[in-house]
Amino acid sequence: MSRPVVTRFAPSPTGFLHIGGGRTALFNWLYARRTGGKMLLRIEDTDRERSTEPAIQAILDGLRWLGLDWDGDVVYQFARAQRHREIAESLLETGGAYRCYATPQELEEMRETARKEGRPLRYDGRWRDRDPSEAPEGVKPVIRLRAPQEGETVVEDHVQGRVVWQNKDLDDLVLLRSDGNPTYMLAVVVDDHDMGVTHVIRGDDHLTNAARQTQIYRALGWDVPEWAHLPLIHGPDGAKLSKRHGALGVDAYRTMGYLPLALRNYLVRLGWSHGDQEIFSTDEMIAAFGLESIGRSPARFDFAKLENLNGHYMRAAPASEIMAALDDVLPELGPPRGIPVPLPSDLRDLLQRALPGLQERAKTLVELLDSAYYLYAPRPLGLDEKAAALLQGDAVERLRAARSALAGLDAWTPEAAESATRAAAEAAGVKLGQMAQPLRAALTGRATSPPIFDVMAVLGKAETLARIDDRIAG
């Protein structure tokens, strides 16, 4: 009987949640949910200088924002160091490991010889079969794995296929440093075993680690988990995704105005395919996801594609979801735009009424807020360059004609406002657009906006007429 699936996401808290880490977490989460298993979260905080509490919080916040929950409590690797030491000691007792007293000078000589001979550095095993009684004075030993020297180590990978290493090319890796601290290789194996992890899904930069870790599992007599090593994400130019390609952290995409569901949908399609389908609900993702559909080639991050996908989600989201997303990012995005935080009730009401028109045009929350400028800008509205151009010449006369027609309305609806403006345009001998564009500039300060008669309905009659008066007064 097969064991229930247990996956894990195990980031190092040395910064934000990288976009590649977000995808790795998503794939682990989807596979666990697809199989009725669990996804665990382990923070690999053994680098004490770089592992900070803000970085840990950024990872947890990023996962929560993406909607990726984990099962059970967060496991912190550093807190388990004593358990890692015990396992290293147990391997000494069984002969699966040995104490190595090679001095720093000897190790440097090995490195120098390897460099001169043009071969990779490998520890030469000089303490593999020596008696510790020969140990030099004052040298604290490391504990090394007694790795197999003949045959091969094979990794059967769900993504990469069968990968083979010749054991003669793999040296005796360090399990415990001379200061008693466990190495990454040992800690990962012990933690994954103790947490019951059945499937290790991670970036393919860890593929060689899988061979090393397989050797540790076998030395301990433990079951080796199943492996799935994901190709890394590349930038649009085909190079490994880096800072020069733009935002790297999940938190940066949040600040750039992307919706979590859109980013999640985009990430699932980076390296995984399901026919021609591009848009997935959460349930569809879970039902369709499988490791066999992950490609071996690196995926390319396409910002334009992400923006278009986000635009789809912006248009499809209910107003309550957009308002919740705005509330989440307004502390960062609002004040620089002159938007008070928290939103005053009257501005919130205006924004909610304007949302249908704003959602239709905006691809991100940032675009939505910028196009909502007319709702929160102080009067008289500042004009962008194109709006100022629309108010040149006889535009003021057209504003006066439109104002007169609009002032006489009893019913204040988009349809009534359009009908009155159309009649004023006909009376002035101009097209509707020639009347509507100066109105757009006067009411929004911009040359583009949601439909202008919808804008009038949102602003209300008094505010609409007052803004027209601002422009007539010059």
Image (cartoon, helix red, strand yellow):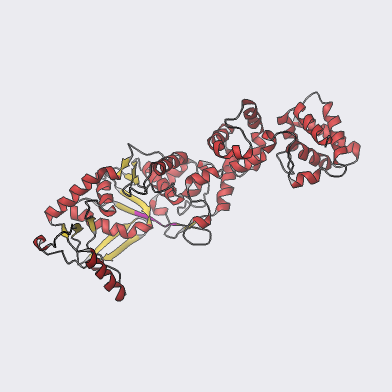
Closer to the camera in the image, 470 or 325: 470
Q: Say if 269 sits above or below 126 in the image.
A: above
In the image, what residue occupies the spot 22% across and 62% down? 172
Q: Is residue 256 magenta?
A: no
Give the quadrant of the C terminus.
Answer: top right
In the image, what residue occupies the spot 80% across and 44% down? 390
Q: Position of residue 360 (x, y in %)?
A: 65, 40
Tally the marks: 0
- State which quadrant residue 178 falls in: bottom left
Closer to the camera in the image, 86 or 24: 86
Q: Say if 148 sits above or below 415 in the image.
A: below
Q: Position of residue 433 (x, y in %)?
A: 81, 42
Q: Position of residue 341 (x, y in %)?
A: 58, 32
In the image, what residue occupies the spot 79% across and 38% down? 439
In the image, what residue occupies the spot 23% across and 63% down? 104
The answer to whether residue 113 is seen in the rendering is yes
Q: Position of residue 349 (x, y in %)?
A: 64, 27
* Residue numbers of the magenta segment: 228-232
| 34 horizontally vs 260: left or right | left
The answer to whether residue 359 is seen in the rendering is no
Please identify the residue farthest to the bottom as the structure is shown: 117
Please identify the residue farthest to the top as the structure is shown: 410
Give the quadrant of the N terminus.
Answer: top left
- State which quadrant residue 419 falls in: top right
Closer to the camera in the image, 131 or 454: 131
| 145 horizontally vs 446: left or right | left
| 149 horizontally vs 270: left or right | left
Please identify the residue farthest to the front as the structure is shown: 138
The chief SS type of the magenta part is strand
